[in-house]
Image (cartoon, helix red, strand yellow):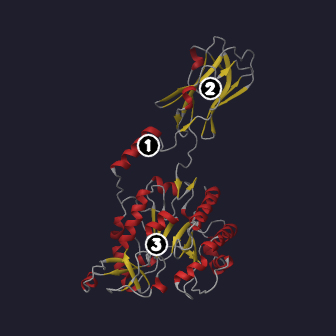
Amino acid sequence: MKVKLSFLSSFLLVCCIFEQGICGTKVNIEELRIKISDRSYADTSGKLRFDVRQGQTFCSTIRETFSKPKRNQEYFKNRNSGTFGSCYSAKFDPEEGIEFRIISDSGNDAYIDSAGVKLRGEWMNWNGYQVKVNKHGAGNAWRYVPGLAPTCPYVINGVAGACNVDVLHFTFGSAHNTGAGSYGTMRTRLSSYSSGLGCNYNSQDISITSMLEDHGIRHLDLDTSYITASDDARTSNSYWEEGIVLVHKALYSRPLKRALREINDFLGRNPHEVVLVRLKDYDEPYRTYISNALESEFSVITNTGLSPTSNPKLGDAVSNNQRLIVYLHADFGAHRNMHTLNQVETYKKQASTTGCFAPSEHINRFGGANAARTRSSGVQLQVDWYYVWGLCLKDLAKLCNEGQFDKLVEINDEILRIYGKPVNIFMIDYVGLEDEAKKFKGIIEDMNRKNAGLFG
């Protein structure tokens, strides 16, 4: 799939590459150090300064950076010492090699064993032994130091340091039946009227854009059917469009392409975000229609590519701009850059009228007959945090939203302890309902900070 960059995006990317090396990684020098040798007369009555260069960037500290350094002593100067000169504002890429030299203002030679520049909290050190530092000649030679090991330059899904975490060791907040209610009240197939059955079928009531932008949703659950050309001809109502349509059981929403365009726009505005899509449940009579149309429908995704692997490292997904990962029911067969769904989920056709789940209910569902698959690699772990009957779906969601979200932390901690990996997906109904503080979003981000520390 081709990735299109706007003129502005291309301009900013070029500026980033030429002005900052790896985009956004150039940093100021934090500290300088020298170690004077222990040989006789290694010290000097003069003063020493640093020159530092990398590519077209060059800076010098002031003449008196290290004044009259003594034999067998180590000296440090930080950026608040008033000695950095032009090196105070100069920026360098710590992941590329750097050169520095130490210049004396005196004919009284000094001898050093090592010197270093600190960038990004790490020392880039040169080591020698009784190397002469003088005003003229070989003693003012440039010393080359290799770059530091790369770190993660991105904040991904709200979390720093997650570049080396793969999808199966990360956690995503999910909207159950994403399209069921996101475009208003649904309809029965080919009807000209809104259905009065929304109580039992609408799972959401805010737009997909709001879910993504405002509530941190990064996994979208899309149930599907299909409107054929002959279906379209049987109704004069322009509401219906040929193609894959979002559904929840007997009720129909809007075309899949509308949801995909919202996802595409979001990913275009947010180049460090990674989103997962699941197409699992479908209307059986239209399976072949849906399968045949999938690749065409997903062609509206132009701001990123579809990930060619099912479990990429997040940093690779961002740097390669393959930030949409699509999982399909096995019944849909093989499709380019779409992946067969492989998961253990805690779904149970369960009712309530007064209270929410106990954490142990979901923890236990990963064990027993599911334990072997839960432990195996390549399997997503999903908690379905919603009831399916007993009250209207919106009233059921109220039982488990906001005030009950701390239970998700308990579930995740226990799954980590037992299986050594996190829950990948927490799926809820009515995203944002009774969650004005956006607690769900914050809890998922906190889990991922922990994931970055454990698996990054």
Q: CA distance from mark 3 to mark 1?
A: 36 Å
Mark 1 packing: few (<14 Cα in 10 Å), some, or many (20+)?
some
Q: Secondary structure at mark 2?
A: loop
Locate residue 424, reporting x and y percent: 57, 68
Of mark 2 and mark 1, the one earlier in the sequence is 1
Asked if the residue at tag 1 contacts the one at tag 2, i.e. Cβ–Cβ closer than 8 Å, the answer is no
Circle number at residue 206: 3
Q: CA distance from mark 2 to mark 1?
A: 29 Å
Asked whether 116 or 11 is in front, the reply is 11
Screen quadrant of the C terminus: bottom right
Q: Secondary structure at mark 3?
A: loop
Q: CA distance from mark 3 to mark 2?
A: 56 Å
Residue at x 47% of width, y 40% of height: 21
Q: Is residue 256 above or below residue 85?
A: below
Mark 3 packing: few (<14 Cα in 10 Å), some, or many (20+)?
some
Mark 2 packing: few (<14 Cα in 10 Å), some, or many (20+)?
many
Q: Secondary structure at mark 1?
A: helix
Asked if the residue at tag 1 contacts the one at tag 3, i.e. Cβ–Cβ closer than 8 Å, the answer is no
Q: Is residue 404 left or right of residue 319?
A: right
Asked whether 186 or 287 is in front, the reply is 186
Locate residue 418, reporting x and y percent: 69, 70
Whether residue 178 is visible to the viewer of this picture, yes or no, is yes
Of mark 3 and mark 1, the one earlier in the sequence is 1
Locate residue 128, reporting x and y percent: 65, 26
Residue at x 56% of width, y 21% of height: 141
Locate residue 100, reporting x and y percent: 57, 27
For label 1, the residue is 16
For label 2, the residue is 83
